Each structure stands twice: as structure tokens, then as C-alpha cells.
Image: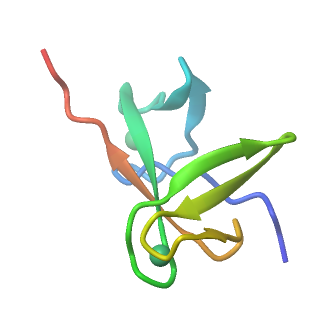
Amino acid sequence: MADNVENICPQCSSLLSWKDHGYFCDFCQQQVEKHVFCPDCNEQLERLQACGSASYFCNHCNELKSKSRVKVQFEMRAETR
Ligand SMILES: [Zn+2]
Ligand SMILES: [Zn+2]
């Protein structure tokens, strides 16, 4: 199974780039937020950085979730100006 999940803009389906510690769509010129949800309870997961590999923790289930199982959703960041 492929490990590299493609990061796609929810608006225009183009590949997202990494900019200022976040995802950015060059096409829409907008920042995109990545949300990760628990595959079991649908709560938003907390991202843990451990030894180079990222893993996710669910505060609701109180356990670690495998990166391959979590649900990833991208959302345009609302402009606050
Ligand atoms: Zn876009
Ligand atoms: Zn959970």
C-alpha cells in the first residue's frame, strides 16, 4: 500500500504545496488546513511527532491511531481580514 497520501486542494483538486508550516494552494492562493479524524469515533486527532514519524492520538478513545487508518480532510482556511 502506498504510504504517500496526496495532498489535494478541496476546491480545485490541484496538488498542495508546503508553505509557512501549512499547506498552501498555489492555484487558489489560499492556505489549506489539514484535519485528521479518528477512524473509530470521528473525533479530531492530536498529532504527535515521535522520532521523525508522525502518529496520531485520539483523546476520545485514549489511544494511538495508525497513520494509515486515520481520515484526512482538507479545508480552505477562511480569510480573516
Ligand atoms: Zn486550490
Ligand atoms: Zn477515537
Q: Where is residue 27 in the image (x, y as percent from the top left)?
A: 43, 32
List the single residue furthest toward the bottom. Answer: 40
Q: Quadrant of the N terminus?
A: bottom right
Residue 3 placement: quadrant = bottom right
Q: In which quarter of the image is the C terminus?
A: top left
Q: In this view, does 7 lie to the left or right of 51?
A: left
Position of 19 relative to 55 (above/below) = above
Pick whichever, 9 or 52, lies toward us.
Answer: 52
Q: In this view, does 34 lie to the left or right of 6?
A: left
Position of 36 relative to 9 (above/below) = below
List the single residue furthest toward the front. Answer: 62
Give ligand 1's quarter of the image.
top left
Residue at image location 40% in from the left, 38% down from the top: 32
Coloring scheme of the render?
Answer: rainbow
Residue at image location 53% in from the left, 17% down from the top: 20
Q: Position of residue 8 (x, y in %)?
A: 52, 52
Residue at image location 64% in from the left, 70% down from the top: 65
Position of 81 relative to 69 (above/below) = above
List the single residue furthest toward the left. Answer: 81
Residue 6 placement: quadrant = bottom right
Residue at image location 64% in from the left, 77% down from the top: 69
Total numbered labels: 0
Q: Position of residue 39 (x, y in %)?
A: 51, 80
Pick whichever, 67 or 81, lies toward us.
Answer: 67
